[in-house]
Amino acid sequence: MTLIRHQNGWVIVLSFVLALILTMLPLPDWAELGRPEWVALVLIYWCLALPERVGVGVGWLMGILLDVSRGALLGQHALSLALVAYVAALFHQRVRVYPLWQQSLTILMLVALHQMLGLWIRGFIDQLPNSWLYWLPSFTSMLLWPWLYLILRDLRRKFRVS
């Protein structure tokens, strides 16, 4: 049995902190509806890149932080991000070999799953959205995925995160 030594975990932590900041950053009303799911995107990237380091537990923790920062029902984002992390880690070997455009479609499905679970939970407390624009963050996240993937991959390689 070999002992695996993890390096430069601060890059992972810093990427999640930046994702939380981007999530809380105020936007104009017209742009607020299309805000990408930054935390979900960063979580998916690290689950695909390093599933032995970032997984369901990190997804749950980031979801709790997201619940607190957004003032949502405690556990709403935690449940959905933990499930997204599980699915991403489960299929990481398959998704990593996809070209970026196919990965973007996978991201669309994973972020839509995150939003669907949030919608399901919000339905229990009668806080359903009024329009189909609720799904817009899934599409903006899909469009941003190639650039976020390339940036995080370059950071992971430059700082040799393992």
Image: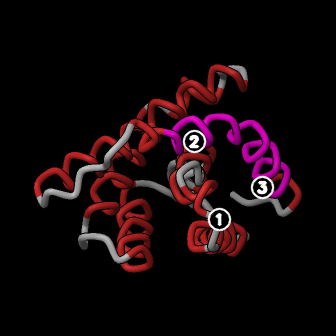
Name the residue nearer the viewer: 146 or 50. 146
**Disc 1 or 3, which lies upstream in sequence?**
1
Question: What secondary structure is marked by label 3?
Answer: helix
| Residue type at numbered disc 1 | Pro
Q: Is residue 130 left or right of residue 65?
A: left
Which image quarter: residue 145? top right
Q: CA distance from mark 1 to mark 2?
A: 32 Å
Which residue is at the far left? 124
Q: Residues within 10 Å of mark 1 (few under 14, many from 20)?
A: few
Magenta: main secondary structure: helix
Question: What secondary structure is marked by label 1?
Answer: loop
| Residue type at numbered disc 3 | Arg
Say if the magenta span includes residue 143. Answer: yes
| Residue at the disc numbered 2 | 48
Residue 59 visible in image: yes
Q: Is residue 86 left or right of residue 14?
A: left
| Residue at the disc numbered 3 | 156
| Residue type at numbered disc 2 | Leu
Q: CA distance from mark 3 to mark 2?
A: 12 Å
Q: Residue at x 83, y 52 (%)?
A: 157
Q: Position of residue 70 (x, y in %)?
A: 42, 73
99, above or below 123, in the image: above
Q: Is residue 84 left or right of residue 150?
A: left
Dot label at residue 28:
1
Which colour style is shown? secondary structure
Residue 9 visible in image: no
Please tell me whether mark 1 or mark 3 is closer to you in this view: 1
- Magenta region: 136-155
